[in-house]
Amino acid sequence: MRESLAVACGAVMMAAGLAFAAPAAEQAPAKHPLAQEHPIVVDARGIIPPIAWSVPGVTEPIQSVRDRMVTDKVTTLQLRPGKYMFMTTIFSFEFTVSLDGKLDYMKTIDGCVGGRGTATLMVTCRKMQPVDP
């Protein structure tokens, strides 16, 4: 009796368009803008001869770099918005990644660094030139 009642109720619900549906797949909640990682390309092939480089807190320390983080290779890093430091054994400079994944850095190093407003950091000088006051 109960079985036939359940079948009858199911038939009535289906006829009325009230069929049970599986819950829709849950979408992952959107990441907070500061947690969103952006692909940032580091191209330091302009530094000749090649030397090791590092972005502290993201890549391995410069003392440990073997042949992965050398300026003769283009590398893509996954960076969140914030401030970072590009370092070699000769020089270093600070750059920032914006909420939309674009780069910025001090205008005084424009002669050695390129890519402001893009997602590609181009380093072209072996050492930073002195800044005129």
Image: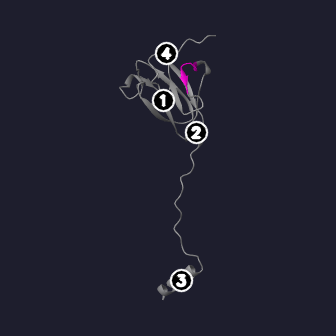
Kind of element beneath mark 2: helix
Instruction: Find residue 34 and name its label.
Output: 2
Quadrant of the image for the C terminus?
top right
Depth check, mark 4 against mark 3: the one in front is 4
Q: Nearer the viewer, mark 4 or mark 2?
A: 4
- Report whether 13 appears left or right of 1: right
| Numbered-mark total | 4
Q: Amino acid at mark 2?
A: Leu
Which residues, given as a range, are shown in magenta? 109-114
Residue at numbered disc 3: 11
| Distance between the alpha carbons at the discs numbered 2 and 3 | 51 Å
Question: How much space separates mark 1 and mark 2, taking CA atoms?
Answer: 21 Å
| Residue at left offset 60%, top offset 38% | 100
Pointer 4 residue? 127
Residue 91 painted magenta? no
Does 125 sit above or below residue 28? Answer: above
**Quarter-of-image position of residue 73:** top left
Give x and y (percent) for residue 69: 41, 27
The mark that comes first in sequence, 2 or 3, is 3
Name the colour scheme.
one colour
The answer to whether marks 2 and 3 mark residues whose Cβ atoms lie closer than 8 Å is no
Q: Secondary structure at mark 3?
A: helix
Viewer-closest of 4 and 88: 88
**Residue bearing the label numbered 1:** 42
Pick out the residue farthest to the left: 66
What percent of the width, then of the height, locates residue 84?
53, 28
Disc 4 versus disc 2: distance between alpha carbons?
A: 32 Å
Give the amino acid type for the residue marked by disc 1 in the picture.
Val
For marks 4 and 3 on the same chain, the one whose residue lies earlier in the sequence: 3
Q: Which is in the foreground here, disc 1 or disc 2?
A: 1
* Mark closer to the chain start, 1 or 2: 2
Answer few, some or many: residues within 10 Å of disc 2's Cα (few below 14, many 20 plus, some between 14 and 19): few
